[in-house]
Image (cartoon, grey):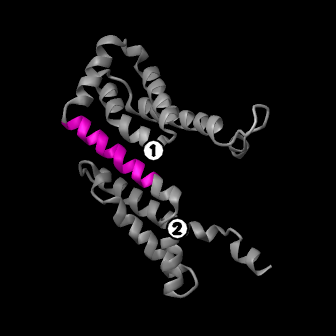
Amino acid sequence: MTNESENTPHFHALIPFGIFIGIYLGTGFYLELSGVKMGFYQLPGPVAAMVGVAAAFALFKGSLEQKFNTFLTGCGDKNIMTMCVIYLLAGAFAVVSKAMGGVDATVNLGLTYIPAQYLAAGIFAMSAFISLAIGTSVGAIVALGPIAVGLAEEGHLSLALVLVPRLWGGDVWGQFVYHFRHHDCQHPHARCQYARQI
């Protein structure tokens, strides 16, 4: 009975996350409206995250040692570490590709052979394929993001139209199909747990 009450989800557990989002977005919007160029990049995300972490330490009960143990256990979870490694490697790939001219070459190749009206659909297909191949949307978004932005700018397409429904939508679709196909289906006629969760 005690364990159930201790593990019951509470809304106040999201307060530190709300503080992080509020500080990061609030600072970004304020700087953008003040005329600062690239206002959202002026406050590093880890700084806002540390404010949220400090708020969590201040709000929740328990000794400082218990709070540190809980925090470090969560940070060391294998799923979180895997996502961080994928994000770092995909970011390194994107930076190296851009530095050696790979992003510009890919954008020019796409604009040469793909009509402008099909660029958005092509970005969706590429992001879905990459996400399906590697099994994660995070790595695909980071790796394909610079190419999608370049195609949108050179093809005079709406950046919001390309990044949100095409790039992000394709990545999520590819990741869903990957999990649906590889992880949770034990039998061809079985219903997948991943599909039921969504």
- Magenta-tinted stretch: 83-99
Q: Mark on residue 74? A: 2
Query: For the residue carrying disc 1, how many other residues have a C-alpha within 10 Å: few (<14), some (14-19), or many (20+)?
Result: many
Image position of 65 with respect to 9: above or below: below
Most extreme residue toward the bottom, as rendered? 63
State how far apart marks 1 and 2 are (Cα).
19 Å
Observer-nearest of 177 and 141: 177
Most extreme residue toward the front, as rendered? 187
Give residue 114's quadrant in the image: top left
Q: Mark on residue 138? A: 1
Q: Secondary structure at mark 1?
A: helix
Relative to 67, is 141 on the left or the right?
Answer: left
Image position of 44 with respect to 92: above or below: below
What residue lies at 55% left-to-right and 68% top-to-bottom? 15
Q: Is residue 88 magenta?
A: yes
Give residue 120's quadrant in the image: top left
* Lower sequence index among marks 1 and 2: 2
Image position of 44 with respect to 166: above or below: below
Name the main secondary structure of what is drawn in magenta. helix
Query: For the residue carrying disc 2, how many other residues have a C-alpha within 10 Å: few (<14), some (14-19), or many (20+)?
Result: few
Residue type at the position of mark 2? Gly
The image position of residue 98, as x and y in percent, is 23, 36
Residue 166 shows in this picture: no
